[in-house]
Image (cartoon, rainbow, N blue to C red):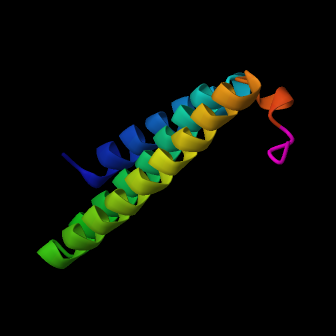
């Protein structure tokens, strides 16, 4: 696979994630769109890193970034679940106040 193909796939994934984050109103769907966008950026960074310097040090850094992203998304889903349980809110326009 070439660098151009890798970047094209990353751009396609980013576009789908951007559409999902902008067009949806359900909190979980917006977070899924954001996760797709972050994954596309990681894929593009990993592809550029691989084609510029194919060494395992870059792959280790990408794995650390993916682990941090996974933890961040888990915390976001926990907040969304708490909002739904406490207030019955699952839409972004109704989830503006987290302190009640």
Q: Is residue 34 left or right of residue 73?
A: right
Q: Quadrant of residue 28?
A: top right
* Number of marks in picture: 0
Q: Quadrant of residue 29?
A: top right
* Residue displayed at 13% across by 73% down: 56
Tell me the quarter of the picture where residue 26 sits: top right
Q: In terms of depth relative to the viewer, which is nearer, 47 or 32?
A: 32
- Residue at the (85%, 29%) spot, across then down: 93
Q: Position of residue 74 (x, y in %)?
A: 45, 46
How far from the left and from the top, in percent, is residue 63?
Answer: 26, 63
| Image vertical order of residue 38 relative to residue 24, above or below | below
- Position in image of residue 70 (x %, y %): 39, 51
Taking the image as drawn, is residue 43 in sight?
yes
The answer to if 99 sits in the magenta stretch is yes
In the rendered view of the protein, which quadrant contains the C terminus?
top right
Camera-side residue of 69 and 23: 69
Name which residue lies at 29% across and 58% down: 47
Question: Taking 66 as reference, is 88 above or below it?
Answer: above
Residue 55 visible to an observer of this rendering:
no
Residue found 76% across the figure and 27% down from its top:
87
Q: Depth check: 5 or 19 in front? A: 19
User: In the rendered image of this protein, does residue 8 appear above or below residue 30?
Assistant: below
State which region is magenta.
96-100
Q: Is residue 73 left or right of residue 44?
A: right
Q: Please identify the dominant SS of the magenta region.
A: loop
Residue 88 picture location, percent across and down? 73, 21
Image position of 85 with respect to 55: above or below: above
Location of the N terminus by quadrant is: top left
């Amino acid at each position: 696979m070439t660098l151009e193909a890798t970047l094209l796939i990353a751009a396609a994934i980013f576009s789908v994630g951007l559409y999902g984050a902008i067009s949806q109103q359900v909190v979980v769907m917006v977070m899924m769109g954001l996760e797709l966008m972050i994954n596309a950026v990681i894929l593009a960074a990993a592809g550029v890193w691989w084609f510029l310097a194919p060494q395992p040090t870059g792959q280790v850094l990408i794995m650390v970034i993916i682990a941090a992203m996974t933890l961040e998304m888990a915390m976001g889903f926990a907040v969304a679940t708490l909002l739904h349980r406490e207030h019955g809110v699952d839409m972004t326009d109704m989830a503006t106040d987290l302190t009640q």
